[in-house]
Image: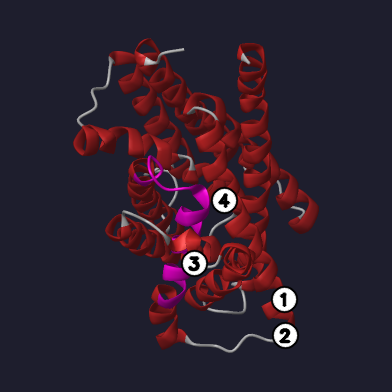
Amino acid sequence: MTASKSAATDQRPLIAAGFMVISTIGFVAMHVIIQRVSQDLHPFVTAFFRCMFGILVVLPWFMKSGLEPLRTSKPGLLLLRAFVNTLAMMMFFWALAITPLMTTTALAFTSPIMATVMAIFFFGERLGPRRIGAVVVGSVGVLIILRPGLIPLELGPLLLLVSCFLWAVTVLIVKIISKTESSVTITAYMTLMMAPMTFVFALPFWQTPTLEQLLWLALGGSLGTIGHLTMTQALKVADTATVMPLDFLKLVWSAVFSYALFLTIPDFWTQVGGVVICAASAYLAYRSHRELRPSIKV
């Protein structure tokens, strides 16, 4: 029994890595689709349909389990998470429509850094000198990409940073919720609640999509929901230090998609800044794991 349990435990990092790889591909592919569709549709309308078609992914759960996925002890936190996530999505989709894909992906890595700092206020966590250093390095990565004073500070990157701040808030909320709720419940509530919320934002800018646009939006919505589900599942299967460093694959997929679809190569400073921010995020995850390890009973 002990050997069997040990073998199952040994497989957990590999299984979590598989979920995370799928998640990174799903998110970047969704971003490519949204960026393309948003050239013709208002980003808020695009966000609404992304949520609507994302519901298609969770429908099989209800067909199989009825309303069981909606059974929860934290409806308030799930509602708060959906609202904050909606605001973050609105800004992110707006930024995605006016910002290069690689820049979007690189700046998105600031969310874990922001979450680390915010955890001081949410959970009373203390940052040691190494984690403070990683936060500073990550901030330098942002400055490398934005280069304030050297190039004009555009609206897209500013929207991205605000969006990342809001997403960092949702990360902390999910950290609380996931202690008692399954990844299916968390994803189901997010998808079902965000559809009507995004509709409110989209209504003043309403445009009816063409059939082709609807098909692309359906694919993008499904990929986004799959990305959220697999990321949540990866974090439940293995610790953050094992999972989050693989998030750097988003940079790889963004570069590949940018060249393959748009024949564009990200500028040098964006690549450097992205790597710096990603490295800082990965190190923060590693340090968090190391600091928690002594209290974990094996």
The local crowd at label 2, few if under 14, some if 14 to 19, many if 20 or more residues have their Cα within 10 Å, is few
Please give the name of the residue rendered at 52% of the width and 53% of the height, measured from the top-left corner: 184
Task: Give how far apart the Cα atoms at labels 3 and 4 are.
Answer: 18 Å
Task: Give x and y (percent) for residue 222.
Answer: 65, 63
- Return the residue at label 4: 229
Q: Does the magenta stretch include residue 104?
A: no
Q: In which quarter of the image is residue 186?
A: bottom left
Task: Give how far apart the Cα atoms at labels 1 and 3 are.
Answer: 28 Å
Lower sequence index among marks 1 and 3: 3
Task: Tell me the SS state at disc 1.
Answer: helix
Task: Tell me the SS state at disc 2.
Answer: helix
Q: Is residue 31 left or right of residue 166?
A: right
Q: In this view, does 281 lie to the left or right of 162?
A: right
Please give the name of the residue rendered at 45% of the width and 26% of the height, measured from the top-left corner: 285
Lower sequence index among marks 4 and 2: 2
| Viewer-side residue, 106 vs 168 | 168
Q: Do the residues labelled 2 and 1 touch (CB within 8 Å)?
A: yes
- Return the residue at label 1: 215
Q: Quadrant of the N terminus?
A: top right
- Callout 1 amino acid: Leu
Residue range (magenta):
177-196
Task: Give how far apart the Cα atoms at labels 3 and 2 are.
Answer: 32 Å
Can you tell which mark lies on residue 211? 2
- Colouring convention used in this rendered image of the protein: secondary structure
| Viewer-side residue, 175 vs 263 | 175
- Return the residue at label 3: 67
Q: Reply above or below: 237 against 284.
A: below
Q: Are marks 3 and 2 in contact (CB under 8 Å)?
A: no
Q: Are marks 1 and 4 in contact (CB under 8 Å)?
A: no
Main SS category, magenta section: helix
Q: Are marks 3 and 4 in contact (CB under 8 Å)?
A: no
Q: Is residue 72 left or right of residue 278?
A: left
